[in-house]
Image (spheres, rainbow, N blue to C red):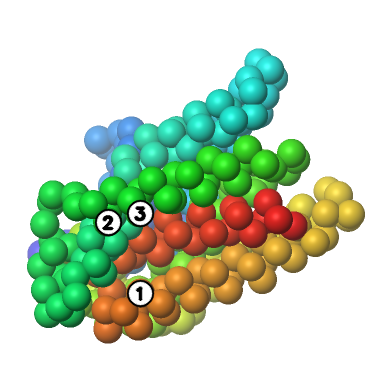
């Protein structure tokens, strides 16, 4: 194992980044990854915002195609949200549901135990309904800029996950989120994703200057919601788990969509 890690550390920079990107695609999405690709799961969380932009871009293309087919806005929005779940395999939505079930327990000592239960409770179901309703109705009310808004929501949601990984303790000895906490420590890991998201806002202003209010909402609203969502879960639980990482993604996406719809 040590010999393998040494070989990986000596591999070219872009080769290591490619292996991390392939791992991020395999972990965060349901997109097929060729078996011949090398996967490097350690440190892949720093690429999560990029994966979010990719997911948002694919959803934007789907939305554009449905619009060309004269699909009604509500039906189109619902199909995009369903495709959103399909692309991620419901990974983050499942975390939001488990987190809601855990927070519903009055005894703080039992919250992690309830969150680990694979059965979905009433509060988890209600959380899923709330998230999906907010996303669908917010998209339905958006008359323009839908592709870029989808990219911003998915990107900032995953940047918020990265903030939570770096900023707060991990509450379990193992789990899907443990590998993120073990390999992501430095605030510098926030910078690549932040640069990409700021570039998205800058591109929006470059393409249409009158949309600067939307771009500002994407930047400042996205950053604030992403940070505050993770802080709120930390306040309630005293740390984070893989489930709360998913909850940060889902609630940041939903709330940012609502904000941008208002703008």
- At x 13% / y 51%, what residue is drawn? 118
Residue carrying label 3: 127
Residue carrying label 1: 233
* Residue 138 visible, this angle: yes
List x then y, in percent, for residue 51: 46, 51
Q: Verify CB contact (< 8 Å) between mark 2 and mark 1.
A: no
The quadrant holding residue 209 is: bottom right
Above or below, 199 against 229 in this view is above
Above or below, 28 against 195 in this view is above
* Secondary structure state at the residue bearing disc 1: helix
Q: Verify CB contact (< 8 Å) between mark 3 and mark 2.
A: yes
* Residue 166 visible, this angle: no
- At x 70% / y 64%, what residue is drawn? 217
List x then y, in percent, for residue 137: 57, 42
Q: CA distance from mark 3 to mark 2?
A: 6 Å
* Secondary structure state at the residue bearing disc 2: helix
* Secondary structure state at the residue bearing disc 3: helix
The quarter of the rendered structure image containing the C terminus is bottom right
Residue carrying label 2: 123
Q: CA distance from mark 2 to mark 1?
A: 16 Å
Res. 14 mark: none
Quick one: label 1, few (<14), some, or many (20+) residues within 10 Å?
many
Q: Nearer the viewer, mark 3 or mark 1?
A: 3
- At x 11% / y 73%, what residue is drawn? 110
Above or below, 65 against 252 in this view is above
Of pointers 3 and 1, the one earlier in the residue sequence: 3
């Amino acid at each position: 194992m040590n010999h393998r890690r040494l070989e990986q550390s000596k591999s070219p920079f872009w080769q290591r980044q490619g292996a991390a990107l392939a791992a991020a695609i395999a972990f965060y999405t349901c997109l097929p990854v060729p078996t011949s690709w090398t996967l490097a799961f350690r440190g892949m969380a720093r690429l999560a915002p990029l994966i979010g932009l990719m997911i948002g871009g694919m959803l934007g293309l789907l939305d554009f195609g449905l619009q060309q087919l004269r699909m009604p806005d509500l039906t189109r929005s619902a199909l995009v949200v369903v495709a959103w779940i399909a692309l991620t395999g419901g990974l983050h939505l499942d975390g939001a549901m488990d987190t809601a079930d855990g927070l519903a327990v009055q005894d703080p000592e039992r919250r992690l135990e309830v969150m680990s239960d694979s059965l979905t409770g009433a509060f988890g179901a209600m959380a899923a309904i709330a998230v999906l309703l907010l996303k669908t109705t917010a998209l339905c009310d958006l008359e323009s800029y839908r592709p870029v808004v989808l990219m911003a929501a998915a990107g900032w949601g995953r940047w918020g996950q990265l903030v939570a990984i770096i900023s707060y303790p991990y509450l379990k000895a193992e789990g899907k989120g443990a590998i993120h906490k073990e390999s992501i420590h430095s605030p510098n890991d926030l910078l690549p994703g932040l640069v990409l998201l700021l570039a998205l806002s800058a591109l929006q202003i470059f393409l249409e200057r009158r949309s600067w209010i939307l771009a500002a909402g994407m930047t400042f609203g996205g950053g604030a919601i992403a940070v505050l969502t993770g802080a709120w879960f930390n306040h309630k639980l005293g740390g984070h788990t893989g489930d709360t990482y998913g909850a940060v993604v889902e609630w940041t996406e939903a709330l940012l969509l609502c904000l941008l719809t208002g703008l």
